[in-house]
């Protein structure tokens, strides 16, 4: 049986940076060549970044993607890498955008993969299954492909597929079995969700069985707006054995020798299988089989949920800041758990010299909260400042007759104005610190504590915020480092401290009670009856659902934040603001 040395390039492209992404392909292909690779794989939409959203409709962008692909093929040959086959994702089109007046049935923009060889595009493949759920809107952007491209490489028939093709049965993988291929390549832009890696391996195994072939699965890493990609690239044999698996959340070249069945003596003819045409091509020559020991990519063991989420949040924040070219971030440090976790995430993502933490005490800020904020700053080494807001609040109250909640909200808005002023003056990106539980029930002040350009814990339930804080401290101690989050911030009852003795529990159920209801309603789409049947108190359910339903207008104005759950607010969960439907008791 032939052996192919595969190189799976788990890299971090940037949307719209065609030249920079092409340079990544060139540099990682060089590394793969130096490792003796005979086939190199890059992620979905590698050249354009992913997802490109409505850039698909700009014909200039599509033309630039196609031109960049041709240029990349020539550049790889000029680099002395022309004999090495390279599979790369890009944006293509064989007709006008589907939204245009001159659209043609069955033609339009394509989510595509190309195999580059000897300075040219040897073959192309158009994604067949187009996801249209959750964060995906690919039916809006792309036209589905109906051809399975099979290319003979080193005596092995290799089929090209893209991301969602793996997540649905039938189509390309069923056609691949009929074609008798030895290897299915699957290039991905698969966003992270907690525990998705536990789902992915069984899925790859099912598709390997369906195709009767080994699968090389490569996924990108990096943050793109609310999405974060974790990699988790792997190779699985036809009988389901996991040969090698890459680490999560880091760029990585996974190189592994795979023994594969030899192709039939004669190439298959063009045929129809499972509603897909089979088209065969051949790559005439590839680098010779390397001498010496076999390449072994290794197996990375999964990590604890808290470690996985922490890495996702750090990477999502780092890439949002760096890819948008912000020099630094600023956030309010209240001494509470949420701002402490956001500060620790920011320091891990950017380093303490790029993080400014500001204590913004009012007359209701407790001494222990001020001390906890200062303690966190000392532990993490961030730039710490104190800006008392009471004189500014008093100035407003001297000119406005306000009382009750209006005074509480005024304090939050003065804090927001102060942080935004520092952002304008010094160029920082303001980080807001509200968790998903607060966002769900509207427990925030518009243009106050909700102010900011990015929210690292937007998709993190309050109970998970506590777990993350405890994990981060334990991990620091295990490594002989200072725990970044003060124990007082973790242990004390949560409070907005906008009035004397105020606690979150004055107006909200305890978070151990609240979060399971919210998870069922928001993430699980359970109605009132389903939540009550699950064992929740009917009166508490009614109160919580009322809070969630009436806070939609606030969520629509919230900052973006890294998605880690199956249903994040924003891209995943889209409900009308003006909406009279209620889950009645």
Image (spheres, rainbow, N blue to C red):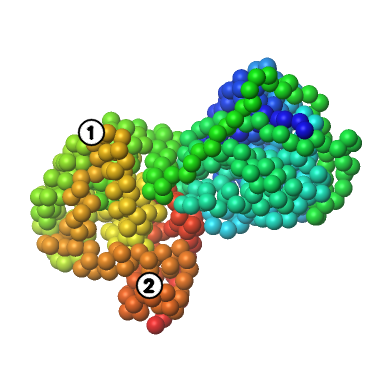
Q: Is residue 562 left or right of residue 418?
A: right
Circle 1: element type: loop
Point out which mark residue 381 bears: 1
User: Height in image: 306 above or below 38?
Assistant: below
The x and y percentages for residue 412 are 22, 55
Q: Quadrant of residue 74?
A: top right
Circle 2: element type: helix
Asked if residue 98 shows in the view, the reply is no
Asked if residue 292 shows in the view, the reply is yes
Quarter of the picture containing the C terminus is: bottom left
Quarter of the picture containing the N terminus is: top right
Name which residue lies at 82% across and 49% down: 178
The x and y percentages for residue 38 are 69, 26
Q: Is residue 563 left or right of residue 350?
A: right
Point out which mark residue 545 bears: 2
User: Height in image: 318 above or below 199?
Assistant: above
Viewer-nearest residue: 71 or 174: 174
The x and y percentages for residue 510 are 27, 66
């Amino acid at each position: 049986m032939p052996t192919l040395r595969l190189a799976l390039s788990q890299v971090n492209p940037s949307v719209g940076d065609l030249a920079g992404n092409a340079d990544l392909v060139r540099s990682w292909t060089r590394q793969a060549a130096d490792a003796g690779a005979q086939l190199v794989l890059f992620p979905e939409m590698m050249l354009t970044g992913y997802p490109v959203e409505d850039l698909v409709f700009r014909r200039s962008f599509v033309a630039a993607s196609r031109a960049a692909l041709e240029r990349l093929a020539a550049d790889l040959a000029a680099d002395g890498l022309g004999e090495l086959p390279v599979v790369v994702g890009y944006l293509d089109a064989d007709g006008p955008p589907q939204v245009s007046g001159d659209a043609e049935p069955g033609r339009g923009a394509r989510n595509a993969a190309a195999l580059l060889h000897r300075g040219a595009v040897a073959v192309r493949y158009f994604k067949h299954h187009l996801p249209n759920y959750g964060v995906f809107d690919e039916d809006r952007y792309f036209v589905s492909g109906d051809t399975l491209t099979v290319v003979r490489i080193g005596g092995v028939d290799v089929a090209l597929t893209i991301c969602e093709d793996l997540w649905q049965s039938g189509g390309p993988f069923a056609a691949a079995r009929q074609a008798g291929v030895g290897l299915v390549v699957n290039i991905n832009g698969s966003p992270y969700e907690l525990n998705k890696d536990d789902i992915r391996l069984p899925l790859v195994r099912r598709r390997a069985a369906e195709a009767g072939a080994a699968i090389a699965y490569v996924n990108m890493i990096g943050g793109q707006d609310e999405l974060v990609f974790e990699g988790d690239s792997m190779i699985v044999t036809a009988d389901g054995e996991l040969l090698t698996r890459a680490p999560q959340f880091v760029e990585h070249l996974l190189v592994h020798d795979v023994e594969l069945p030899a192709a039939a003596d004669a190439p298959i003819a063009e045929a129809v299988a499972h509603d897909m045409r089979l088209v065969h091509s051949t790559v005439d020559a590839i680098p010779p089989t390397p001498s010496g020991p076999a390449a072994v990519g290794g197996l990375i063991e999964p990590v604890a949920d808290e470690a996985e989420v922490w890495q996702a949040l750090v990477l999502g924040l780092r890439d949002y800041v760096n890819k948008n070219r912000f020099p630094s971030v600023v956030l309010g440090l209240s001494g509470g758990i949420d701002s402490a976790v956001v500060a620790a995430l920011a320091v891990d993502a950017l380093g303490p010299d790029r993080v400014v933490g500001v204590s913004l005490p009012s007359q209701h800020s407790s001494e222990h909260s001020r001390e906890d904020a200062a303690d966190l700053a000392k532990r993490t080494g961030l730039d710490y400042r104190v800006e008392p807001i009471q004189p500014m609040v008093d100035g407003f109250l001297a000119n406005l007759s306000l009382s009750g909640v209006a005074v509480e909200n005024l304090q939050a808005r003065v804090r927001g104005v102060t942080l935004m002023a520092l952002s304008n003056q010094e160029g920082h990106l303001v980080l807001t610190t509200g968790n998903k539980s607060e966002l769900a029930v509207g427990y925030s002040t518009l243009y106050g504590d909700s102010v900011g350009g990015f929210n690292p814990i937007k998709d993190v339930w309050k109970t998970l915020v506590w777990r993350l804080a405890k994990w981060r401290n334990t991990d620091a101690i295990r490594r002989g480092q200072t725990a970044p989050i003060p124990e007082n911030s973790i242990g004390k009852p949560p409070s907005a401290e906008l009035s004397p003795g105020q606690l979150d529990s004055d107006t909200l159920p305890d978070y151990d009670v609240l979060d399971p209801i919210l998870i069922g309603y928001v993430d699980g789409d359970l109605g009132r009856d389903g939540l009550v049947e699950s064992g929740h108190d009917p009166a508490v359910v009614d109160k919580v659902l009322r809070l969630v339903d009436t806070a939609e207008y606030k969520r629509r104005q919230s900052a973006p934040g890294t998605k880690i759950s199956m249903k994040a607010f924003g891209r995943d969960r889209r409900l009308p603001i003006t909406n009279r439907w209620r889950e009645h008791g």
